[in-house]
Image: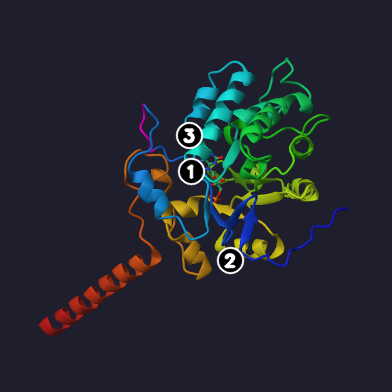
């Protein structure tokens, strides 16, 4: 049995070394598609700068949303040309000043569709056995890490997600842990110093909580964590964390914890978690709308607090005026 050692530095607000990046805390903004880039050209809108910079913190990590390359991959017949595109895209991202690249193999998007038998029905060398199904993602990761340093590269996975019809049935050559364990082993066999795995917890799927009938109480990313740690790499998590549960997790595991929905409505989420301040509930109706409303304009706790005490003061004044008038 492999015993996971708690490192002394565990705790959400302790520094963390991710590959070659030094972070000052462990609350990460999860990658979220918000559809605010230009519909035709995919160019980020001027709002994106305000959206991301108001969520940036000293020494914090933001995983920005995926770019359009992913949509274009889907129309390409051959994995080989996709590998080339992805490698170019990653190189360009680093050239443009990004600190690293997270390859998206989660939530039923293209790489996940290749990995899982539930969606991969190919009969060529990219389908069938687990080794065949992971050939494409491993090819991408090998190619990307040949042009940018492996510690700068991560992989996002959602072995238990059911979003977009995913979740492997358990069989002789399938099942979430069986398939993803093989993927991880192969990955670490092929790539030295690979950056990290970013795994979605089974209680989460896509942009929502897993429905109860799909939850499966025994489902856990634990076995994958063990493989990653055994190879001296980094395992990070996301999905359904609250400030309280993240703090408990942070005490137990030396990991980054990514938040999605709460970051949409709390630009100062990191500060709120640190100071145990209440969170503003997100608004699902504006997750993917294409204008400013619901994207910008969410107040920080301090501003909200000042606004609400001003409103309370006004009510008090009005109440005394009413009293005097009466
Ligand atoms: C508006 C929105 C868009 C998202 N877009 C993506 C996406 O494009 N790709 C992805 O893998 N996950 C996406 N997610 C999932 C988040 O990255 C995260 O895993 C999920 O929200 C669970 O975290 P939470 O429980 O803290 O919200 C999205 C989530 C939200 C709320």
Secondary structure found at label 2: loop
Mark toward the viewer: 2 or 1: 1
User: Total of numbered circles in the picture?
Assistant: 3
- Look at the numbered disc 3 and say if its residue's Cβ is closer than 8 Å to ligand 1: no
Q: Is residue 241 visible?
A: no
| Residue with the mark numbered 3 | 67
Q: What residue is drawn where x is 63% and y is 42%? A: 154
Q: What residue is drawn where x is 71% and y is 20%? A: 126
| Residue with the mark numbered 1 | 97
Which numbered disc flags the more N-terminal residue, 2 or 1?
2
Look at the numbered discs 2 and 3 and tell me whether their residues touch, using CB distance below 8 Å: no
Residue 197: x and y in percent read: 67, 45
What is the C-alpha distance between the residues marked 2 and 1?
A: 25 Å
Residue 243: x and y in percent read: 56, 63
Magenta stretch encompasses residue 204? no
Secondary structure found at label 3: loop
Q: Which residues are magenta?
A: 36-40
Q: Is residue 206 visible?
A: yes
255 on left or right of 68: right
User: Which disc, if any, is residue 71?
Assistant: none
Look at the numbered discs 2 and 1 and tell me whether their residues touch, using CB distance below 8 Å: no
Q: Which quarter of the figure has residue 82?
A: top right
What is the C-alpha distance between the residues marked 1 and 3?
A: 15 Å
Report the front residue among 279 and 236.
236
Q: What residue is drawn where x is 64% and y is 28%? A: 113
196 on left or right of 182: left
Dominant SS of magenta comes to loop
Look at the numbered discs 1 and 3 and tell me whether their residues touch, using CB distance below 8 Å: no
Residue 190: x and y in percent read: 76, 34
Secondary structure found at label 1: loop
| Residue with the mark numbered 2 | 13
Which numbered disc flags the more N-terminal residue, 2 or 3?
2
């Amino acid at each position: 049995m492999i015993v996971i050692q708690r490192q002394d530095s565990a705790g959400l607000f302790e520094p963390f070394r991710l590959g070659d990046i030094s972070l000052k805390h462990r609350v990460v903004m999860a990658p979220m598609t918000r559809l605010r880039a230009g519909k035709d050209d995919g160019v980020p809108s001027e709002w994106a700068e305000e959206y991301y910079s108001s969520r940036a913190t000293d020494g914090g990590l933001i995983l920005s949303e995926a770019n359009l390359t992913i949509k274009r991959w889907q129309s390409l017949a051959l994995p080989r040309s996709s590998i080339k595109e992805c490698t170019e895209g990653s190189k360009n991202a680093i050239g443009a000043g990004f600190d690293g690249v997270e390859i998206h193999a989660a939530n039923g998007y293209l790489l996940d569709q290749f990995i899982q038998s539930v969606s991969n029905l190919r009969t060529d060398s990219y389908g069938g056995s687990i080794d065949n199904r992971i050939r494409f993602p491993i090819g991408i990761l090998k190619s990307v890490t040949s042009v940018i340093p492996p510690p700068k590269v991560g992989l996002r996975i959602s072995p238990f997600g059911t979003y977009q019809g995913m979740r492997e049935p358990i069989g002789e050559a399938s099942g979430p842990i069986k398939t993803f364990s093989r993927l991880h082993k192969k990955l670490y066999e092929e790539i030295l110093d690979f950056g990290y795995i970013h795994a979605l917890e089974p209680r989460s799927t896509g942009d929502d909580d897993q429905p109860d009938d799909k939850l499966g109480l025994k489902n856990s990313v634990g076995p994958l964590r063990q493989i990653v740690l055994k190879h001296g790499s980094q395992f990070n998590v996301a999905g359904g964390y609250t400030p309280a549960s993240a703090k408990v997790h942070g005490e137990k595991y030396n990991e980054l914890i990514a938040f999605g929905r709460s970051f949409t409505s709390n630009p100062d989420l990191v500060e709120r978690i640190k100071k145990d301040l209440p969170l503003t509930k997100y608004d699902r109706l504006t997750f993917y709308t294409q204008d400013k409303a619901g994207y910008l304009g969410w107040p920080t706790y301090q501003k909200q607090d000042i606004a609400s005490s001003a409103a309370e003061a006004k009510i008090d004044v009005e109440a005394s005026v009413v009293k005097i008038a009466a």
